[in-house]
């Protein structure tokens, strides 16, 4: 257990709730990592109907055939080879795909190249399973990407897996097509696996989503991680999927899922089927996406008005990393200490970049899922606070 990490974003909420209880002050939450909307109405109706239709029993471990087929079609749009239902394993959220894939692949001392800063669970699971995390820095000046040359320098004869996440949490970075192609070439050249976390695939605000499976030879060495949580605002349904053209890997994912959960909650699968296939879902998704884009533009403007804080416009997901190095140096504090002061003195909750890895130390992460009113309120409070100390 000593090797297993956690998602500190959750412990920050516990600290914030304690602060609110003790102080009687309500915080403005600008750290939230989930959609600021409820699940679409047709999805909720499908969930209720599934219960009424007595879809209350076990399903096959890898999921109901119609949902596997729908997910296969969904990912075929982005892939060089069409996917089929048997390539899809439905699991309880995006997270289990990390756990199962890394579990299936990694032996002690195998190396896993992990972007940094990044979603912390890749690292946690790799270390728990005895693997070695090799961090690769996502540089602000490259749109929070690494370069192909930097990736090559990280590869050794122990490297087994590269993890990529585009659009990315926490930076909002998107891997451009050219770099994606170069990563694919490197993976093939060195015979490596790729875990491609595409959970924010619909949230590309500038340009288009490119999957690494778009490149020949990649669907066989890639597991796509995706799910209903972000696109359809269904985080509480706990429904995700792993997709791979490698039959052995698909079988391993299924075997691990069978040992772990038997199958995913049946009504959630029917709800996800509605979400993925029904034309009624589209307007809700489009509304959410257009709102995120508006809120992103607002937040970029407001962050750049704060002395000592700068950010570029993030291309995807719903996160924004602001560079606060000047403030940290001037006050002689860390990003974690700055966020703590912003919580206690400005009454706004945001996350230090270090929650996402060592290379997050110049940054704080905002999310722009909150309402326009909350974004204005929170950033106004932070601005007043920074102006008073900077
Ligand atoms: N991958 C990334 C990059 C995420 O940010 C998250 C959740 O925040 C997940 C995966 C997990 O998704 P889920 O809630 O479906 O398990």
Image (cartoon, rainbow, N blue to C red):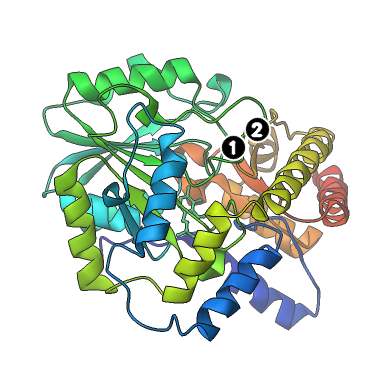
| Rendered location of residue 75, percent (x, y) | 43, 40
**In this orientation, which residue lies closer to the viewer: 134 or 77?**
77
Secondary structure beneath dot 1 equals: loop
| Rendered location of residue 2, percent (x, y) | 25, 65
In this view, 225 is above or below 55: above
**In this orientation, which residue lies closer to the viewer: 63 or 347?**
63
Report whether 255 appears left or right of 80.
left
**In this orientation, which residue lies closer to the viewer: 24 or 229?**
229
Residue at left offset 34%, top offset 64%: 63
What residue is disc 2 on?
A: 314
* Gap in angstroms between the C-alphas marked 2 and 1: 5 Å
Of the image marks 2 and 1, the number of the one nearer the N terminus: 1
| Rendered location of residue 155, percent (x, y) | 22, 25
Q: Is residue 369 visible?
A: yes
Q: Is the distance from the Cβ of mark 1 to the nearest ligand 1 atom less than 8 Å?
A: no
Report whether 164 appears left or right of 40.
left
In this view, 124 is above or below 245: below
Q: Are marks 2 and 1 in contact (CB under 8 Å)?
A: yes
Quadrant placement of the N terminus = bottom left
Residue at left offset 55%, top offset 64%: 235
| Rendered location of residue 18, percent (x, y) | 65, 78
In this view, 247 is above or below 11: above
In this view, 246 is above or below 232: above
Residue at left offset 22%, top offset 60%: 254
* Image quadrant assignment for residue 112: top left
Q: Residues within 10 Å of mark 1 (few under 14, many from 20)?
A: many
The dot on residue 172 is 1
Secondary structure beneath dot 2 equals: loop
Residue at left offset 20%, top offset 31%: 192
């Amino acid at each position: 257990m000593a090797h297993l990490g956690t998602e500190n974003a959750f412990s920050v909420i516990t600290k914030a709730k304690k602060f609110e209880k003790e102080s009687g002050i309500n915080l403005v939450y600008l750290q939230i990592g989930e959609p600021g909307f409820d699940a679409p109405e047709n999805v909720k109706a499908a969930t209720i109907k599934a219960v009424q239709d007595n879809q209350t029993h076990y399903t096959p471990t890898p999921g109901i055939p119609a949902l596997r087929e729908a997910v296969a079609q969904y990912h075929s749009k982005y892939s060089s080879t069409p996917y089929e239902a048997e390539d899809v394993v439905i699991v309880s959220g995006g997270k289990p795909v990390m756990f199962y894939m890394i579990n299936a692949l990694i032996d002690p001392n195998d190396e896993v190249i992990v972007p940094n800063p990044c979603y912390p669970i890749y690292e946690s699971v790799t270390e728990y399973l005895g693997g070695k995390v090799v961090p690769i820095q996502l540089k602000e000046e490259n749109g929070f990407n690494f370069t192909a040359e930097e990736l090559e320098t990280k590869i050794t004869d122990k490297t087994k897996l590269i993890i990529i996440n585009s659009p990315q949490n926490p930076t909002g970075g998107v891997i451009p097509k050219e770099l994606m192609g170069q990563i694919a070439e490197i993976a093939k050249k060195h015979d490596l696996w790729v875990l491609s976390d595409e959970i924010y695939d619909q949230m590309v605000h500038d340009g288009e989503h490119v999957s690494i499976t778009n490149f020949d030879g990649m669907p066989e060495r890639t597991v796509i991680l995706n799910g209903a949580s972000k696109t359809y605002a269904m985080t509480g349904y706990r429904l995700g999927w792993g997709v791979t053209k490698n039959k052995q890997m698909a079988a391993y994912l299924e075997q691990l899922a069978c040992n772990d959960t038997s199958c995913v909650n049946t009504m959630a699968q029917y709800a996800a089927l509605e979400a993925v296939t029904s034309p009624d879902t589209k307007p809700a998704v489009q509304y959410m996406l257009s709102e995120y884009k508006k809120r992103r533009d607002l937040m970029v403007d407001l962050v750049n008005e704060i002395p000592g804080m700068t950010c570029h416009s993030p291309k995807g997901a719903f996160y924004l990393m602001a560079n606060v190095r000047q403030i940290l140096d001037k006050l002689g504090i860390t990003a974690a200490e700055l966020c703590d002061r912003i919580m206690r003195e400005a009454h706004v909750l945001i996350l230090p970049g270090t929650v996402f890895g060592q290379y997050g130390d110049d940054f704080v992460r905002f999310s722009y899922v909150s309402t326009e009113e909350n974004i204005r309120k929170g950033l106004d409070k932070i601005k007043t606070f920074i102006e008073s100390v900077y």
